[in-house]
Amino acid sequence: MARVLSGIQPSGQLTLGNYIGAIQNFVKLQDEHECFYMVVDLHAVTLPQDPAALREQTESVAALYLAAGVDPSRSSIFIQSHVPAHAELGWLMTTLAYMGELERMTQFKEKAAGRESVPAGLFVYPTLMAADILVYNADLVPVGDDQKQHLELTRDLADRFNGRYGETFKLPEPYMPKVGARIMSLDDASKKMSKSNPNPNSYIALLDEPDVVRKKISRAVTDSGREVKYDPANKPEVSNLISIFAHCAGLTVEEVERRFEGQGYGPFKKELAECVVAVLEPLQARYREIRGSGELGRVLKEGAERAAEIANRTVALAKERMGFLPPR
Ligand code: ATP
Ligand code: MG
């Protein structure tokens, strides 16, 4: 069975972008693959996090995986920092990477922009992400389009390691939705929707109340036209809303266009809001049940145990190949 690995940072409230770009595929892939889904807390601290908020968000992300349909009897769900092999292989990958290639990463450039001092962890973020994937020899990595460049770097690092020390790591492939791999901000369609955006009106959080969802969608920026047409180059805002509609209603982009032919943005936005609410309401009900049940502790413990078994073996092999003296 091919192996799947992915993760989301507990750096804020999960958004519809995370759901469409990543979590929907987490659920889809678990039928026919061996899946590992983690909450990447070690990545979240590449920018400062309030300790109490980090703890709460870490649990919240794990509970949202379950609420969205990730099934712990088929998939291993765990917290990245509970499996120390990630950090250990992360260091080895950092020694393999070049400054120049890390400087080219657009996520680094975007997140470092405007900061007076840039944390070194933000710079080496992609080497830890490479370790996350390679430590399981994952075949497929369900991610949004923004992570494609990091995945290419992961393949380069794996290839470099294999060339220097002998065949050790598999080269992973990204797995992205055809439409919706990059959901854009509601207030600015030139930026992707991000949970760490300080403006909550830029995203729809999976835990937003129905009325909040309705308000955010009604305020979402559109062009001055009225045609509901998918044309990302000329109508980025409306195209983004059509992608969201298509995913939430289980329709194709063309079906959405046809449905709103000649109707204008008003009715489209109204129905879009109800579609999103129809997806989020049952998810939120399951989320509340899971948070109240105490089930999460057991799931995360078992997940980390299964993950560590594989991860520890990989790190031991990588260290042996590199010439580290094994402990006696
Ligand atoms: P942050 O702003 O803290 O980076 P984020 O919303 O970008 O948060 P991540 O934890 O960095 O979320 O990414 C989790 C997953 O969600 C990744 O697979 C990423 O590619 C995907 N993702 C994030 N934003 C979007 C988006 N706007 N559209 C589609 N997929 C997305
Ligand atoms: Mg991100």
Image (cartoon, grey):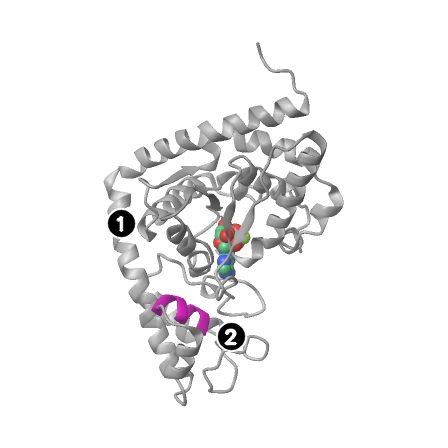
Seen from the viewer's position, the closer of residues 153 and 192 is 153
Identify residue type, mark 1. Arg
**Image quadrant in which the N terminus is located:** top left
Question: Is residue 84 visible from the viewing direction of this image?
Answer: no
Of the numbered discs 2 and 1, the one sitting upstream in the chain is: 2
Q: Percent from the top left, x then y, of residue 68? A: 34, 53
Question: Is residue 190 visible from the viewing direction of this image?
Answer: yes
Identify residue type, mark 2. Glu
Q: Is residue 286 magenta?
A: no
Query: Which secondary structure lies at badge 2?
Result: helix
Seen from the viewer's position, the closer of residues 171 and 153 is 171
Q: Percent from the top left, x then y, of residue 233? A: 59, 76
The residue at the point 65 percent across, 50 percent down is: 108
Identify the magenta region. 242-249
274 w.r.t. 226: above or below:
above
Q: Is residue 62 toward the left or the right of residue 158 in the image?
A: left
Q: Is mark 1 within 8 Å of ligand 1?
A: no
Q: Percent from the top left, x then y, of residue 201? A: 45, 65
Label 1 crowd (10 A; few <14 / some 14-19 / many >=20): some
* Quarter-of-image position of residue 217: bottom left
Q: Which residue is denoted by mark 1 in the rendering?
A: 288
Q: Is residue 248 toward the left or the right of residue 229 in the image?
A: left
Q: Is residue 29 toward the left or the right of residue 298 in the image?
A: right
The residue at the point 27 percent across, 45 percent down is: 290
The residue at the point 35 percent across, 60 percent down is: 208
Label 2 crowd (10 A; few <14 / some 14-19 / many >=20): many
Q: Which residue is denoted by mark 2 in the rendering?
A: 237
